[in-house]
Amino acid sequence: MTLFRAAILNPIDVRSWQFLEDGGLLVMDGRIHALGRFDDLVKNYPWEPVNLDGVILPGFADIHIHWVQHAVRGRYAQALLPWLAAHIWPEEARYADTALAQQRAETFYDDCLTAGTVMGMSYSSPHPAAAHIAHAARRGDWITGNVVMTANAPADLMAASAKSPADLASLSEAIGRAHYAVTPRFALNCAADDLAALGTFARHEGLAVQTHLAESAAEVREVERLFPQALDYTDVYDAAGLLGPRTVLGHCLHLSQREWSCLKIRGCWIAHCPSSNEALDSGRFDLACARRHGVPFALASDVGAGPSHSMLHVMQRFRRQHQAASVRVDPEETLFRATIAGARAMGRGAVAGNLGVGKRGDFVLMPRGARLQSPQSWFEDLLDGTAAELERRALGTWISGQQIFVGGRPALPEPLMPC
């Protein structure tokens, strides 16, 4: 049992958070046992505290990130479809090399934890071995899927892609159902029959589904050409049985009102990727429409189109893009979308996402700053800076109450202060 003492900012819902200027966080056996004012907690739990100079936040969740693109994040600026063909597919082909995949996976998780990200949903390359490596190397709570590519893609990637139900069943069994997602890359890379087979498999096995939807206008037009029988892009996935409460759809920038209604009815989640949308000039997410239809969404980096794996940077772009369009985004909602909402999208809402009693002791320590008396002002200051600065802003990251990183460096393997 460890008692941490620091300022604490704990998201509650989309409109509110709990701020404790002198807070206590008690972690026992990796779970949060108590949270409150330090003076109140220490009366019932009179242990010597671990004093932390900063502000504790729950660890961040990134529900749409391509770990196999991490090494080339933000490197190329081009429209989506030519960007994929010219840069991303050749990069992902390199992950046939398992030694490369192992080294890159370790770097990816180290960088995420340094930035305060403790959980998420990641896209692997088509190679089953790379997905195995990502799962084995994971640090934190991750759901991973090998992208399925059976059409309109380089021959080597299609040949490497595990796509039959038997192959996918073997892979999901090895990784574990709680950590595996059925992952058609997007409609342009799968024939209708393949999408239907993936939908049937996901439903039969009770697996999460992740894919891309309506990221660019050119992509939407090409889907209309290749799937003339569909009502629209969303209908392609709906007809295949891929839409449901365990489905997370990246981007969703160019949707009709019918499509918004369909996503609401099916209970799908959207991964809103503001920094990626900005980097590829794909468009602005219709935040007002998402709110009006009540479609749930969480924030995500979409590395490598997104230039940074820092969820602080993603939150910065989320606020600034929508505020520039005169759409209000409060600090409370911003933090909620990068924590609780992401955990819920992953099906982890009962065990992660904030500092509620009974949840995992996953948290990140941020600098106190000069305006801590107002948590809203402090939070605005926290998000100020370049992507590189924000990637290194965290002072430390804890998973299940054990410190993993200290100021961008791996922590010592032993616990900080066992009681």
Image (spheres, helix red, strand yellow):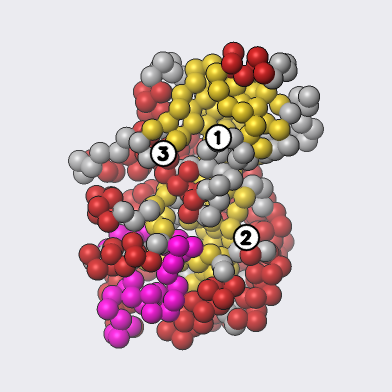
Whether residue 112 is visible, yes or no, is no
The answer to whether the residue labelled 3 contacts the one labelled 2, judged by CB atoms less than 8 Å apart, is no
For the residue marked with disc 3, what is the amino acid? Asp
In the rendered image, which quarter is residue 382 located in? top left
Residue 176: image location, x then y, percent: 67, 64
Which residue occupies the foreground of this view, 369 or 328? 328
Position of residue 87 in the picture relative to residue 134 (left or right): left
Q: Earlier in the sequence, mark 1 or mark 3?
A: 3
Residue 205: image location, x then y, percent: 59, 72
User: Residue drawn at (59%, 16%), measured in percent from left and top?
Assistant: 40
Is the residue marked by circle 3 packed among few (<14), some (14-19), or many (20+) residues within 10 Å? Answer: some
Residue position marked by numbered label 3 in the rendering: 13
Q: Secondary structure at mark 1?
A: loop
Position of residue 27 in the picture relative to residue 264 (left or right): right
Q: CA distance from mark 1 to mark 2?
A: 22 Å
Q: CA distance from mark 3 to mark 2?
A: 25 Å
Q: Residue furthest front?
A: 44
Q: CA distance from mark 1 to mark 3?
A: 12 Å
Which residue occupies the foreground of this view, 163 or 384? 163
User: Residue drawn at (42%, 31%), measured in percent from left and top?
Assistant: 17
Label ID, residue 355:
1
Q: Is residue 104 above or below residue 132?
A: above
Is 249 contained in the magenta span? Answer: yes
Residue position marked by numbered label 2 in the rendering: 178
Q: Secondary structure at mark 2?
A: helix
